[in-house]
Amino acid sequence: MFKIGAQLIIWGSRIFEDLPSVLDEVSKIGYEGVESNYKAFATVKDIKTLLRSRKLNLVALHSTISDLYSEDLLERYIEFLLDIEGSYLTVSGVGHPSRVDLTDKDLEILKKAALKTSEYGVKLCYHNHHWEFQNGIMDRIINEASDMLSLCIDVYWVRYAGYDPAEYIERYLDIVEYLHLKDGTLEDIKERGFRELGLGIIDFKKILKIVKGKVEWLVIEQDRTYKEPKESMQMNFKYIYEIIKYVK
């Protein structure tokens, strides 16, 4: 049975200024979980109570690889996940063009963090963008660290990099832990633009059929919108909810 989560990025600065009202909107739409960075959750005193009162789970705490260079930050993230009963520490940013000269060190830090989180029963996932495919980083992560961590596959960025998301997910299904779902037309993808799910070219039916019984969380992550965030996330939820019924 799939669970639908919301990445809070679409709400922009509101997640730092008024997280409770954002979570109210997330919960009322019907989402079962949320994902964001530590800074957002640290804006309130008792995030565990805040989430539970809205019947929301913490799917993942999202971190950049640069954060994990600090052992103190990594330990803080682990403690936070354990306290709030979060599922994953999800990391991105390895080999970004702005830090490509740090790729070897990034991979070393990523593997070290995966070993550390496993000691506490926390699962570390790597979240892809597009550059990891274009510069060979995804192959290195899979070849060098797949025995230590799992993947959070972002289907949009796989497509942006020129791959078929369904085929890529099927190839590495054994190490895929959960998905980030976003959409766009061919023109959107050329411009790194986004649409609500079902309005672009991503074949979500095919993808969900492949991961059925393997993946629990489907996290909708629409980076930007020209609508109100709540409206876009309502549209996204409704679309994927209908797709889930289709693949049962």
Image (cartoon, rainbow, N blue to C red):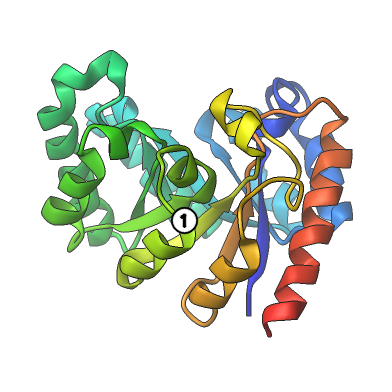
Quadrant in which residue 97 is drawn? top left
Q: Closest to the observer: 223 or 42?
A: 223
Residue at the image point whose x is 76% and y is 43% from the top: 196
* Residue 82 as seen in the image, left or right of residue 228: left
Q: Closest to the observer: 13 or 172?
A: 172
Residue type, label 1: Pro
* Residue 121 as seen in the image, left or right of residue 165: left
- Quarter of the image with the C terminus in it: bottom right
- Quarter of the image with the N terminus in it: bottom right
* Residue 7 as seen in the image, left or right of residue 161: right
Using the rendered image of the protein, determine whether residue 82 is visible from the camera's viewpoint. Answer: no
Q: Position of residue 79 (x, y in %)?
A: 40, 47
Quadrant in which residue 164 is drawn? bottom left
Q: Position of residue 87 (x, y in %)?
A: 48, 60
Give the residue number, with chain letter if any, for mark 1: 165
Vertically, is 81 above or below 103? below
Using the rendered image of the protein, determine whether residue 57 is visible from the camera's viewpoint. Answer: yes
Residue at the image point whose x is 71% and y is 52% from the top: 51
Q: Position of residue 108 (x, y in %)?
A: 12, 38
Quadrant in which residue 146 is drawn? bottom left
* Residue 178 as seen in the image, left or right of residue 20: left
Residue at the image point whose x is 22% and y is 60% from the top: 119
**What is the tally of numbered marks visible in this picture?**
1
Query: Mark 1 falls on what kind of element?
Result: helix
Residue at the image point whose x is 70% and y is 20% from the top: 13
Q: Closest to the observer: 102 or 17?
A: 102
Q: Closest to the observer: 123 or 240?
A: 240
